[in-house]
Image: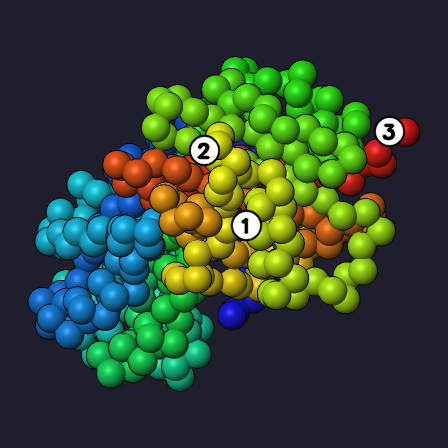
Amino acid sequence: MDMKPNVTFWILLLIAATQLGGMSCQVPKPVAIGEDDEIIVFADDTTWGSMRQLLREVLEDTVFTPQPERWFVLRREPFDQYAAFEKYKNRVVVGTLDGTGPVSEYVIASLDANVRAKVEAGEEAVINKYDSRARNQLLMFLIGADLKTLEASVRLRSQDILYFFKKMMLRWELLEIESRRRYVKTEIQDDLQRKYGWSIIVAHDYFVAIDSASAKFFWMRRANPADLERWIFVHWIDSADVRKLDESYVLAVRDTITKRFMRTVEDDAFVQIAPYNLRIDKTSFQNRFAYETRGNWRFSDKSGGGPFVNYTFYDDSSRRIYMLDGSIFAPRVEKKKLILQVDGLLNTFQSGKSETK
């Protein structure tokens, strides 16, 4: 359970930098192209032959929704076509200092003396360049002194490598949400801020299912089409004891809340956490220590289920524990993109102002 960097702060900072850059006298860079979940790979034949399986294990990691889906698809391209892909969203260049192919030669020529010394010493293996040829893109260099060292470094940094690209997917989703801001239900967002001291973007096709001040629970849903649902809820606990906040607490609170509020129409089953493919990481959510939980939910009668993402954290200014949660119910479609969409909305959450009495 590695500590992750602050996703939201990092994304918003880069968005701001992009917008400010476009205001300068320089011609703004074009927007990156390509699929969000496609990674273009450049590697010499020897390097690719040695690293292909490991790179696929790391970057084509499986997300269970509960059906297995790949986070990314790797697409290797010949290095003589490098310029043709310079505006793509996600690229990886893989090379070694002892390599003799065109990709390794390019990598060696690109390193300054200081970085090269760190690579030779095994202190540096993953180098990221953002927005190098287009806005909102990531170019990652994976470099080692030799193939053995490179393989060891990629294994050691595997979670970070995948996380950098997943972070870019979330960045794209936040940009998409920002582009649709004129369609959001600002009156609901403002009302939440006025009543509760926090807000979240309510997209135009979501409706409020439950808004309970006494239970400190807000639930909004999207059911268009009817067999493809997105659920987002916010639950908060006032005067909370932060010492209680741990993994067991997160799971217990979520199950308690969903059992009470997220029930079938017949009221004979309720939502609960499924006991498989569950992952809890320590992370940072808007500069606050948080638990990020990803897994699958199911109805208590096992009649259906789907993926969910949950952020739970303590807010010092309000002395509250907040739980933000997004779930998907879409039995017949792939759900990776859908869970990313609700994740993006969760990351629009803002708090800090005092509750209106």
Closer-to-camera residue (165/87): 165
Q: Position of residue 38 (x, y in %)?
A: 25, 46
Task: Report the number of numbered marks.
Answer: 3
Separation (CA) of disc 3 from disc 1: 26 Å
Residue 349 left/right relative to 215:
left
What residue do we see at 37% from left, 23% from top? 226
Report helix, strand or loop for mark 3.
Answer: loop
The disc at residue 103 is none
Q: Where is residue 65 drawn, in percent x and y?
A: 34, 49
Give the camera-side residue of 196 and 8.
196
Residue tagged 2? 230
Judge left or right: residue 189 versus residue 16.
right
Q: Which amino acid type is marked by label 1?
A: Asn
Asked if one can make out residue 337 in the rendered structure from this viewpoint, the answer is no
Residue 326 higher or lower than 24, as above or below: below
Q: Residues within 10 Å of mark 3 (few under 14, many from 20)?
A: few
- Give x and y (percent) for residue 105: 20, 66
Q: Going 36% across and 30% down the picture, which residue do you hit?
A: 228
Q: Amino acid at mark 2?
A: Arg
* Vertical placement of residue 303 versus 196, above or below: below
Instruction: Please indicate whether residue 74 sits to the left or right of residue 196 in the image.
Output: left
Task: Please state which of the two labelled residues, at mark 3 or mark 2, is closer to the viewer.
Answer: 2
Chain-order first, disc 3 or disc 2: 2
Sequence order check: which comes first, mark 3 or mark 1?
A: 1
In the picture shown, does residue 209 fall above or below 135? above
Colouring style: rainbow
Q: Which residue is mark 3?
A: 356
Amino acid type assigned to the residue bearing label 3 in the image: Thr
Graded by Cα atoms within 10 Å as few (under 14), some (14 to 19) or many (20 or more), the crowding at tag 1 reads many
Instruction: Evaluate whether residue 269 shows in this view.
Output: yes
The residue that label 1 is drawn on is: 310
